[in-house]
Image (cartoon, rainbow, N blue to C red):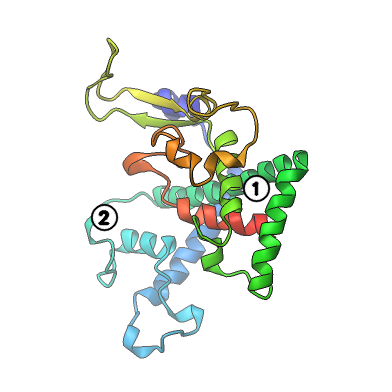
Amino acid sequence: MLAIFFLPNLTRFLKLKVFGKKTTDFMRKIFWETMLDRRSYISEWDESEYPPYPHPRHYKRYDLIDILVDIKWNDPGWRYIENFRLEHVEEDDLLAQASSFFLFGFETISTTVAFALYELALQPKIQNTLRNEILEVLKKSNGRVTHSMMEPNSLSLPYLDMVVSETLRMYPPLGFLNYMAKKNYEVPEHNLVIEEGTPVYVSLLGLHYDSKYFRNPNIFDPERFNERNKRNIPEDVYIPFGRGERFCMAEKFGLVQTRTQSVF
């Protein structure tokens, strides 16, 4: 990963890959079978011919694959990404998008839940507080788990929000964020200029474990994120999903899935 970011020419020369050949061949096969199948009916789509909830085989899903189908074949019927047309797209560029969604949508959530369970096992008091909250909410809903219940910042499960937030502080999915300077930037109060095109790493672990912002940072304490305390956390020191225009677009999905898995 360091070579891909800092030495891209060397990476291309050595043909370094993230996935192995067997995995890549399998993903390429599944991906293009899905793309071609989806295209076969998206290109003939007519909303007026179908009721609101037709058979899944016959409606647009407005998901990642639909977007990639449009980028590849430029279907005029697509209404949401008019500003994102691409004239020339390599086939593996499309596959890379789907692979990234799969990798970052699975690994990040599974590890977050695993670390949350680990910390709850070490601290029975926190575990019991969370369990009692979940059982009380399920009792009120007759055992039904609803989407609104699982949404981030839901009033239904505030302590679960706190546990998930503290897990992401101590165990962020990535230990760092990587950026590329778009223009020269003079760091305030320092004799340092980051020149345009310079690769930049932002250490999430360094921020999340800084005792200046988080007292006793090595202790798992969900109360850091209660309504009173979380207001005192500076905006740019807790960033498990990144910041700016390249923040994680799946933040809400990831939090909903993490909360749901934690409940079950």
Q: Which residue is mark 2?
A: 84
Query: Residue 62 placed where, x, y %?
Result: 39, 68
Query: Is residue 19 at least partly visible in the picture?
Result: no
Other-residue count near label 1 (Cα within 10 Å), few / some / many at <14 / 14–19 / ≥20: some
- Tell me the kind of residue under disc 1: Val
Say if mark 2 contacts mark 1, CB within 8 Å: no
Q: Is 116 or 59 nearer to us in this picture?
A: 116
Q: Compared to 202, does 246 lie above or below?
A: below
Which residue position holds label 1? 113
The quadrant the C terminus occupies is bottom right
x, y (%) of residue 105? 54, 51
Q: Which residue corresponds to the image point at 67% horizontal and 68% vertical from the top-left? A: 138
Q: How crowded is the residue under tag 2: few (<14 C-alpha within 10 Å), some, or many (20+)?
A: few
Q: Say if 177 sits above or below 118 in the image.
A: above
> Which mark, by number, is residue 258?
none
Q: Residue at (43%, 32%) from the top-left corner?
A: 237
In this view, the residue farthest toward the front is 228
